[in-house]
Amino acid sequence: MSELPPSGAEPVPPVDPTRPPSPPADPWAGPAPTDPWAGPAPTDRPGSYPADPPQPGYGPPPGSAPQGTPAGWPAPQGGPPSGSGPQGTPPGWPAPQGTPPSGFAPDGTPPGWPAPQGASPGWSAPPGWHWPATGAPGSAYPGHPMPGAAYPALPMPGGHPGWYPGLDPQDPLVTPPHAGVGGWFARCAGAVRRGWRHLVPIMLLTQAVPAAVISVVSLFLVPTDEMATGPDGAPVLPDGYLEQTLAFYGVVLLAALVFGPLQAVGWAAGTWVVARQAAGAPAGLGDALRYGVRRALGLWGWTIVASLLITFGLCFCLLPGVYAGFAVALFGPVYLFERQDPIGRSWRLFHRSFGMVLGRVALVACALLAATVLDVVVGAVSGAVFGADPTTAPGTTVGAAALAVVGAALAAPAYLAQLVGLVVAYAEQRAQEGPVNAARLAAELG
């Protein structure tokens, strides 16, 4: 009798009663090993491979399922099986394309790099974004440059986005972009607080004294005769009225030309004090006046040119002259700091930042208008107290002259506001062009 088993029968191994039952089949296992969502092979099966260890910084959020499903949510249909990698890859499989390399942050940021601008804490790259970033639509991090490229500069501490390095938002003279009229006014007030001990004497000596002299001289030259009435009832000019009027304006113009260099000394000296003190450099009164003397003739010459341009514009229905006055208002600081083409440069600055310069110069003009109104009030008081012609008696002459001097002295703050306001406005326009600070402007004065 043959010992071989019957034909068609398979040998059956004996059953070990102590062996535990086999685990149930994995419901997420795919039909073929080529399926990327297939479950891991049992470790007791020949040819199995160990699971891929998780990479630092990767994995599902805290409290979520291994497949990345939030806590309490059902597993997604066709999702990764239990035991797969953090990205849903089977154990031992390479990470799919678009996953950040090992050691990178969850958002794909290279080690040591800051998170993309505008990213909230815990932000990660959306699915399907790829590394490296190219800046093209669909790339991983539009805020990051290509590897090896220069990283864009971040805003300075306390600065507005878009500011450039080298611009100090706390500079005592230069108003940075986006600071507005409040920043300009704060720097004007700071300049006055720092330098009023020098600026007030300079303004009194170089601006108030010429104004007082011209006012006193005007008391003797201003026409005092009143209009007469002709036989037909029409007004008639008094005898010698035109001659007296021409003499009056001729003397005033001559005095303005004579005192022009002295006034230019004051504008240059005051600008020097404002810039030097803002830079933290010593600024003595004598040194300021010596600097003003060096720059006086050139500044006086350009003042004559600007005055002629404004006067020519006033001859055309007033508005062109006002427009020209605003457009060339910065010629003084331009000449002192740059010393070339002050009229053209001021014109370009005005039209490049039209609203900004117009607003700053308008505020300065308001201070000058207030001084003009004050002078009119003083003149009205003098006329009411000492009469239309105070030179008829020595007492009234002295009283009217004293009031004229007081009126000129009271206008000194307006001159100070004009000086500081225009210098700070010019520094603000320089900041619109590139990095600049008080130290550089002080050095440019020479």
Image (cartoon, grey):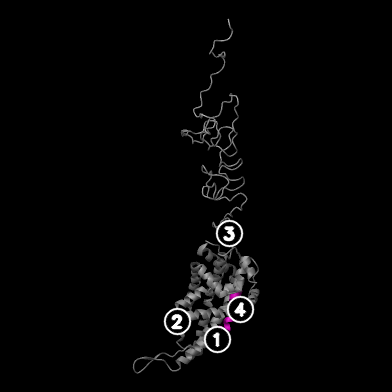
Q: Earlier in the sequence, mark 2 or mark 3?
A: 3
Task: Kindly indicate whether the residue at mark 4 contacts the one at mark 3 (C-beta within 8 angstroms).
Answer: no
Q: Main secondary structure of the magenta part?
A: helix
Q: Which mark is residue 298?
A: 4
Q: Mark 2 is on which residue type?
A: Ala
Tell me the residue that label 2 is attached to: 380
Q: Nearer the viewer, residue 328 or 390?
A: 328
Task: Kindly indicate whether the residue at mark 2 contacts the one at mark 4 (C-beta within 8 angstroms).
Answer: no
Region in magenta? 253-269
Q: Residues within 10 Å of mark 1 (few under 14, many from 20)?
A: few
Q: Is 148 located above or below residue 240 in the figure? A: above
Q: Secondary structure at mark 1?
A: helix
> Is residue 275 among the parts visible in the rendering?
yes
Q: Nearer the viewer, residue 440 or 193?
A: 440
Tell me the residue that label 1 is attached to: 254
Please name which of the two marks, 3 or 4, marks the residue nearer to the observer.
3
Please name which of the two marks, 1 or 2, marks the residue nearer to the observer.
1
Tell me the residue that label 3 is attached to: 164
Which residue sits at x=55%, y=18%? 20
Task: Kindly indicate whether the residue at mark 2 contacts the one at mark 1 (C-beta within 8 angstroms).
Answer: no
Q: Earlier in the sequence, mark 1 or mark 4?
A: 1
Q: Secondary structure at mark 2?
A: helix
Q: Earlier in the sequence, mark 3 or mark 4?
A: 3
Residue 254 magenta-highlighted: yes
